[in-house]
Amino acid sequence: MSDSNRVGLAGRLRGCAANLAVLTFGLLLALGLGELLVRLLVGNPPDLLDKSDPVLGARFHRNAVAERRIDGRRIPIRINSLGFHSPEHPFARQPGVRRLLFLGDSFTGATEVVLPETFHQRAAGLLSRGGLRCEAVSLGVSGYNTVQELLVYRELGRRYQPDAVVLAVFVGNDVSDNHPRLSGANLPFYALDPGGALRPLPFRPRWTRNRSWLRDSALYKWQKVVTNEFFSGFLKAQNILPRYGVYRPPTEAVWREAWEVTEALLRAVRDAARAEGQPLLLLLLPEQIQVEQTAWSAMLERYPKMAAERWDLGYPQRRLADFARRERIEVLDVQEAFRAAPASLYNRQEPHLNPAGHALLAELVAKRLNQLGWLAPDASRR
């Protein structure tokens, strides 16, 4: 290669490097401006979930402190050292103090209200009367399915030695979340073998702690929400989202499998608690469309393909209540009490319970536990 060619090649390489540097700078500048704009216009909602747990799949970030804004309310959130929205309680029991353990998903994790307003803490307060002292431990986490609730009970819940276990089942998606084809999420799943026994399916968390820096980016979280809403809205407009199959008797094999696995998992939770001498209360939590006619009508108007189908909004509660009776599991269905409430029990901005919803749910749970007598001073461990 001649000297002139070498000089020309070196010049072109320098030009490419300069262009690449300008492009990189422009991209970083655009990302920085995008991050700033999203923080100013939308805010930076906290990403509380740690999805790196190799056993449970997820829990909240340990010792996280954040603030949420929902329906004009500022909600300070503090996660405990084990990664749950619950007070710090040692595994060892305090003498003379009754203890409740709550399992569930985001309705139990309840980061939409401050900790003292959560239904489990309110219920413990209502039960701490007449000389009885009661405390509540919550191991609920957003996105949990029944597999994860069983796993967290085995890993941590039983070590708290509760007097009773309350398993909250959100009928809107808990059944579909127990089947990989219906859920679509990267969660621990179980299946039934030919003999009807539960067996775990392979699971590996997609996130690691090395990628946790993304949870602090407002731009990343905003694009994730926008993308999910776009595709979810598109699918709803064109089809029917799979999870709504819970609102009618199953005719497809995938839904029959989802129900069978769910019922087997509920038996497994009951048996695990029973082995520790702890009775189980199955708490059935309704979706807003089951409680408020306006919410159901708005959904049918927005997604007309759903209006052409036949639905039975009471089906999941009836099936689960029948299952609980057959299996001798105590059950609390709050659907009718929620329907009778004078005002909405759900947030306007997102579909979880508002403070009034938690307050009513706490009253219903405390009343049912009092009726069962599991926390009475002379109650024997079951």
Image: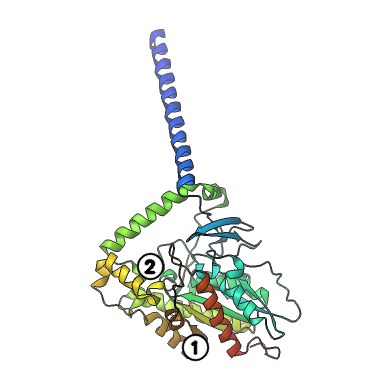
Determine which of the numbered discs, if any, sits on residue 168 in the image.
none
Q: Amino acid at mark 2?
A: Leu
Rendered view: 53 above or below 28: below
Q: Is residue 329 above or below residue 106?
A: below
Say which label, 1 or 2, has the lower sequence index: 2
Examine the image and state in which quarter residue 255 appears: bottom left
Residue 30 as seen in the image, left or right of residue 104:
left
Q: Label 1, label 2: how many angstroms apart (C-alpha)?
A: 26 Å
* Residue annotated with mark 2: 182
Location of residue 138 in the rendering, given as x and y in whole percent from the top left corner: 60, 71
- Picture quadrant where residue 139 is located: bottom right
Task: State left or right for residue 167 relative to residue 4.
Answer: right
Where is residue 107 shown, x and y percent of the image? 50, 70
Q: Secondary structure at mark 2?
A: helix
Q: Residue at x 44, y 50 (%)?
A: 222
Element at label 1: helix
Amino acid carrying label 1: it is Glu
Rendering colour mode? rainbow
43 or 79: nearer the viewer = 43
Which residue is denoted by mark 1 in the rendering?
A: 327
Q: Quadrant of residue 59 in the image?
A: bottom right
Seen from this angle, which residue lies furthest right?
Answer: 95
Q: Is residue 350 left or right of residue 124?
A: left
- Above or below 130: residue 175: above
